[in-house]
């Protein structure tokens, strides 16, 4: 059975105190996310990290302040997760750079998860989802997983948003509309 843990945008600009779009809620889930990554790697499972990745003139900056500029400190995976990426685990880890809300939009995620015709990877059996922001990148990536009929577990203790009402609404939508398994 192929299980993949999908860690959405746990980058300095969203999590670290000095990040451009940081929130306390993102910092609060970090221990849980660390534990999930550690457990997945120890079990021999794969971990996919999405990295929000923008250039200086990105259209998204009309909606949000500049963040996650490729090559910047803010673009990097937070140190608490980076330290878990040992040489021994390198074959279990995959990075997906994305510049839109969905981890699937113009990335190799479909192919990596074995969801394309003639994919070089076996089709994923189950995805676990953690990361930020619940109502933006996590939601739109989860929606894509649901549309591809991928059994998905969203760990409520492992997702966060700067907007608590939107966070709760997104979790409810993932459960009731998308039919995903939201683990409280």
Image: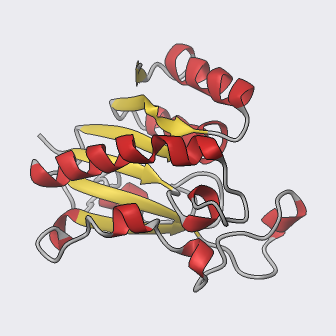
178 and 31: which one is in front? 31
Residue 90: image quadrant is bottom left
Residue at point 38% right, 62% down?
Answer: 80
Is 177 left or right of 60, judged from the image as shown?
left
Q: Quadrant of the N terminus?
A: top left
Farthest right residue in view: 62
Q: Please state the horizontal and vertical placement of residue 27, each as a whole percent of the image.
A: 54, 48
168 lies above or below 113: above
Q: Is residue 25 left or right of residue 128?
A: right
Q: Is residue 140 visible?
A: no
Looking at the image, which residue sits at the far bottom? 71
User: Could you say which quadrant of the image residue 173 lies in?
Assistant: top right
| Horizontal side of residue 102 vs 50, given as left or right | right
Q: Position of residue 69 (x, y in %)?
A: 66, 78
Give the residue displayed 83% in from the left and 64% down from the top.
65
Total labels: the figure holds 0
The residue lying at 33 percent from left, 50 percent from top is: 34
Above or below 164: residue 107: below
- Horizontal and vertical percent for residue 38? 22, 52
In the rendered view of the protein, which quadrant contains the C terminus? Answer: top left
Nearest to the observer: residue 127 or residue 113: 127
Q: How is the image coloured?
A: secondary structure
Residue at x 28%, y 53% (from the top left corner) = 114
Q: Is residue 84 visible?
A: yes
- Residue 11, placed above or below residue 141: below
Residue 75 location in percent, x, y? Answer: 57, 73
Q: Residue furthest top?
A: 176
Q: Nearer the viewer, residue 60 or 28?
A: 28
């Amino acid at each position: 059975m192929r299980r993949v843990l999908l860690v959405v945008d746990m980058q300095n600009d969203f999590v670290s105190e000095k990040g451009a779009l940081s929130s306390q809620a993102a910092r609060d889930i970090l221990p849980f996310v660390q534990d999930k990554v550690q457990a997945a790697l120890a079990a021999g499972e794969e971990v996919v990290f999405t990295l929000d990745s923008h250039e200086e003139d990105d259209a998204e900056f009309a909606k949000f302040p500049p963040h996650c500029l490729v090559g910047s400190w803010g673009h990097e995976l937070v140190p608490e997760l980076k330290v878990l990426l040992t040489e021994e685990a390198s074959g279990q880890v995959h990075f997906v750079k994305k510049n839109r809300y969905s981890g699937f939009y113009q990335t190799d995620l479909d192919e990596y998860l074995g969801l394309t015709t003639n994919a070089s990877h076996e089709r994923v059996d189950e995805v676990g989802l953690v990361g930020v922001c619940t109502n933006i990148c996590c939601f739109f990536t989860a929606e894509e997983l649901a549309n591809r009929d991928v059994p998905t577990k969203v760990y409520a203790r492992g997702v966060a948003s700067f907007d608590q009402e939107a966070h709760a609404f997104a979790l409810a939508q993932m459960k009731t509309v998308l039919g995903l398994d939201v683990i409280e």
